[in-house]
Image (spheres, grey):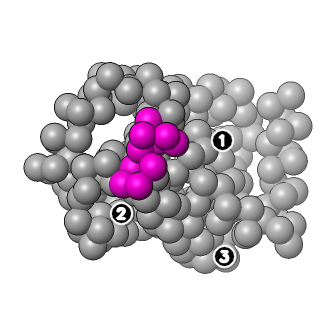
Amino acid sequence: MIRRLYDWTMRLAGNRHATPALFAVSFAESSIFPIPPDVMLVPMVLARRERAWWFAFVCTLGSVLGGMLGYAIGYFLFESLGQFLIALYGHADNAARAQAWFQHYGGWIVAAKGLTPFPFKVITIMSGLAHLDPLTFLAASMVSRAPRFFLVAALLRAYGDPIRNFIEKRLTLVFLAFLAAILGGFVLVEVLL
């Protein structure tokens, strides 16, 4: 099953709809969607390494714009949608404490957590709830998200064939490690919020 999913994703990477799909996943992941855009970025760069910078830019743009939606959810719709999304991750009881942290250290939190596999949607919603200055939020999002995606693209562009061979030979192991990183992000949310 994992092999079929990998092969399908590699075929999608060459499809004319791949770039809009990458943008959509990056946008949605920053506000509501639980899966990070890396699941599309990695195979797309591996399939078309000459377009690595373009894919990283699309990922960054989608993530930052989606982050603005997450911010708006926290700012304007926390009582309805935002609270539901935070509760979905099991952190509704900790929102007040997190809000206080964001009011004092919001820009730094966004900048630091945006570089990690930590679920960015939690950061964006909490930034809006704390009424973090929108320009600070936007700047911190760009400062953290761009290096995150461009670093992935740079490594894959430079070492694409060995990385692709490693992934294809150890697909199940890579999939499980990626799944562990995602789950680790959720555990971090549980511990920190």
Magenta segment, prevailing SS (helix, strand or loop): helix
Q: Count neighbours of disc 1 (C-alpha within 10 A) and say few if under 14, some if 14 to 19, many if 20 or more.
A: few
Q: Amino acid at mark 1?
A: Phe
Q: Position of residue 159 (x, y in %)?
A: 57, 59
Question: Label 2's element?
Answer: helix
Q: Pointer 3: what residue?
A: 51
**Dot 1 and dot 3 residues touching (CB under 8 Å):** no
At x 56%, y 46%, the residue is 32
Q: Pointer 1: what residue?
A: 166
Closest to the camera, between mark 1 and mark 3, is: 3
**Dot 1 and dot 2 residues touching (CB under 8 Å):** no
Rendering quarter of residue 167: top right
Image: magenta residue range: 74-83
Q: Pointer 2: what residue?
A: 141
Question: Label 1's element?
Answer: helix
At x 50%, y 33%, the residue is 84
Question: Could you tell me which quadrant the N terminus lies in?
Answer: top right
Using the image, determine if residue 84 lies above or below residue 117.
above
Q: Residue furthest left?
A: 104
